[in-house]
Image (spheres, rainbow, N blue to C red):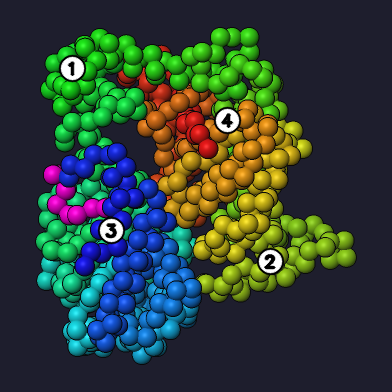
Amino acid sequence: MKSAIEISRDISYKSAGKFEETRFEKIHCEIFKNSMEASKIVAQEIAQLIRSKKEKNKTCVLGLATGSSPIKVYEELVRMHKEEGLSFSHVITFNLDEYYPMNKENKQSYHYFMHQHLFNHIDILPENINIPDGTVPFDELNQYCIDYEMKIKQSGGLDFQLLGIGRTGHVGFNEPGSHVNSGTRIITLDHITRSDASSDFNGIDNVPKRAITMGVSTILRSKRIVLMAWGQNKASIIKETVQGDITSEVPATFLQNHSNATFVLDQSAAADLTRFKTPWLVGECIWTQELKSKAIVWLCEKTNQSILKLTDRDYNNYGMSDLLAQEGSAYNLNINMFNVLQHTITGWPGGKPNTDDTHRPERAVPEKKRVILFSPHPDDDVISMGGTFSKLIKQGHDVHVVYQTSGNIAVTDEEAMKFAEVCNDFVTEEKCSVDFSKIINFLRHKNEDQIDIPEVRKLKGLIRRRESYAATRYIGLKDQNVHFLDLPFYETGQVKKNPLGQEDIAIVKNIIQEIKPHQVFAAGDLADPHGTHEVCLNAIFTALKILKPERYMSDCWLWLYRGAWHEWDIHEIDMAVPLSPDEVLLKRHAILFHQSQKDRVMFQGNDSREFWVRAEDRNKNTAKLYDALGLAEYEAIEAFKKFDY
């Protein structure tokens, strides 16, 4: 019987007119447009297995994973249980791992995670749930791990193992150096693994240094393995795992030897695979303009030459002979590509008045535009497009910045305590509507995994709000053009957020209706490790889709920016806005007004640099890339991609 993943190939990314040659890949990969679509297919395969086992009156033994990757799979399984009658009464589960030491009640425990996302919502028997116990005394751990292995064997072995993958290439908590014959055991966590988990624990110092994990051999004995990976942050390790040599330094590569393993990826996680990154090295291509641009930029970097210096031999030597034959000569390819890139550059992000705009990224008319700059957090605006923000104001456009979330979760307790103590010293209780002594008392006695009380969350949100006003005033924006939405999905007081809801969409829709913009700038930086950027962008997409029939929307263009986490590749850029040295400095100062996010960044992701440093470096690197391709030399460039919604 075919699995749901195999049946789904007609809607997968690779079947949508893409390249199907996979000769560089040593593991079967299925690529989907997004993680939601992929997760539903994985859930369908699991459901199919559960039902087929039940028909034969057999138990179904599932190996389950935690982390962000499987959450949507569990949501779909819960939906199928509630709406389609999928029963888990004949299911036995074994979880991959657990932090050590770790109490089951701790909100960072995998025991808590699994019950929150799956077990509390289905009809599985409690005695059929198996999760490594993070409270076992250390001197009993060895026997406990042996017993865990034996229980899996006595249950008939794992019919299906669900996996994610860490940046070190770990599966479960099998860190680099793990042996192919390793079984369930206690292991010391890699620094990168602990760093990636640090935001969940409010700092790396609070992340446990050890964990209990199923071993590599335990995983490989599973009858079926599906590994899921989402997002650009996983692209590099996915390529290394799928196309590299088998090595204990990347434990996931051991899956190359499994006869029934599939990697289920979204487009971003698959982006570095040869068939997508450089398909001309694999076989014949359908040479769209986007693929031409990508290939020529790559060829310039490979040969260390500017566009206009590329020769016929360069194209032939690097797998592009069919493109050369199609276009006739390197000269034609080079000049066309040079013009494409040249036309992306503009110092007028709102359009230059009284000018032929045929080859400009933005329209000349209307001369003065109404602009919405959506910012997921209260600093993404200046971090990602502070220079362009300033230009739009100086060039006379009616600019509105819209902060979609409060950002309160990213303010440290120490920062909140500082402000609370100042306020408490400055005002008396009779004159103030807020009891700051209550806030101070809570913060002094706050437990490690305790959610902030509403007063603390409000204070932290106000800290970020006032920092935003300081930054926008510095850039030159009027206070009345600053809007704070405080979208409800974000206001949970913890890292885990609620799903996007109708109320969130309505709030975004209302601000668009109110301003009736000619331009919308939004964060397309989906590498945000906690997903807030993606949720905020989906709210905008949904609102724009609802409003599309409105007459004013025919004049509204959507521009996506990046910069907080990574930058657009050169071939993806539709508008490149150069910054002078003074504008780079202005942008830096605007970012530094967000003092609560300086020095001790709670959610910096995989990049340890402060936000102003990473943004400045990326802007300068984009300018260097344009310069290396033979275009004008600038101090820095902010980049944007036009999106047709």
Relative to 130, is 76 above or below?
above
Q: Residue furthest right?
A: 430
Please provide the residue range marked out in magenta.
23-30
Q: Secondary structure at mark 1?
A: helix
Image location of residue 128, percent across then percent down:
34, 87
Cα separation between marks 1 and 3: 38 Å
Looking at the picture, which amino acid does disc 4 mark?
Trp
Residue at image location 29% in from the left, 63% down from the top: 4
Residue on which the image places disc 2: 454
Relative to 410, is 373 above or below?
above
- Which image quarter holds the N terminus? bottom left
Quarter of the image where one finds residue 397 = top right
Looking at the picture, which amino acid does disc 3 mark?
Ile
Dominant secondary structure (helix, strand or loop) of the stretch shown in magenta: loop
Left or right of 36: which side holds 248?
Answer: left
Looking at the picture, which amino acid does disc 2 mark?
Pro
Nearer to the camera, 539 or 88: 88
Residue at image location 16% in from the left, 36% down from the top: 282
Q: Secondary structure at mark 4?
A: strand
Q: Is residue 25 rendered magenta in the image?
A: yes
Residue on which the image places disc 4: 557
Residue on which the image places disc 1: 325
